[in-house]
Image (cartoon, rainbow, N blue to C red):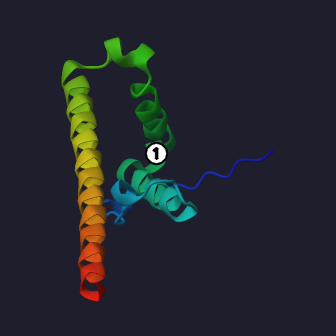
Amino acid sequence: SSTTTTTTSNNNNNKKPPATSATTTMTITPRIYQQVGDLFRHRFSTHAGWAHSLLFVAELPSFRPVLPHDIVTQMDQFKEEEQQRKADMKKKKKQEKESNIDDNDDDDDLWN
């Protein structure tokens, strides 16, 4: 199989990186995959593949002890914030669902 690598020149560092919405996406769609790749190529230029590999390795528990303490702290903080965001979204959906059920109950009372 052949692999095609796309790189961008360092001249793109003046441009704004492409906008992404990965935080609101549940799965990696081809569009999000492309946006993430573009973001890495913009930020790291010819080192985008290397940066991606380091990011992947940093998530592996076996490499955690060799990471700088401040990076581990940032990763832990992000994980906590992400868990809280998900819990808040779940709570909001539950409240909306309960609100819709209550609204339907009120409609039933009109017809009785």
Name the residue at the bottom extreme: 111
Residue of label 1: 48
Quadrant location of the N terminus in the rendered image: top right
Q: 10 Å neighbourhood of mark 1: few (<14), some, or many (≥20)?
A: many
Where is 71 relative to 12, above or below? above
The residue at 34%/55% (across/down) is: 23
Locate residue 73 relative to residue 45 in the image: left or right. Answer: left
Q: Position of residue 4 (x, y in %)?
A: 67, 52
Q: Quadrant of residue 96?
A: bottom left
The residue at 36%/62% (across/down) is: 21
The residue at 45%/27% (across/down) is: 57
Name the residue at the right extreme: 1
Where is 1 relative to 27, above or below? above
Q: Secondary structure at mark 1?
A: helix
Q: Position of residue 109 (x, y in %)?
A: 25, 80
Q: Is residue 8 visible?
A: no
Quadrant location of the C terminus in the rendered image: bottom left
Locate residue 54 relative to residue 33 in the image: left or right. Answer: left
Which of the pair 90/21 is nearer the observer?
Answer: 90
Q: Quadrant of residue 80?
A: top left
Q: Quadrant of residue 29?
A: bottom right
Where is 23 relative to 64, above or below? below
Q: Label 1 amino acid?
A: Ala
Q: Position of residue 58 (x, y in %)?
A: 39, 27
Q: Position of residue 99 (x, y in %)?
A: 24, 67
Which of the pair 78/100 is nearer the observer?
Answer: 100
Which of the pair 88/21 is nearer the observer?
Answer: 88
Name the residue at the front extreme: 112
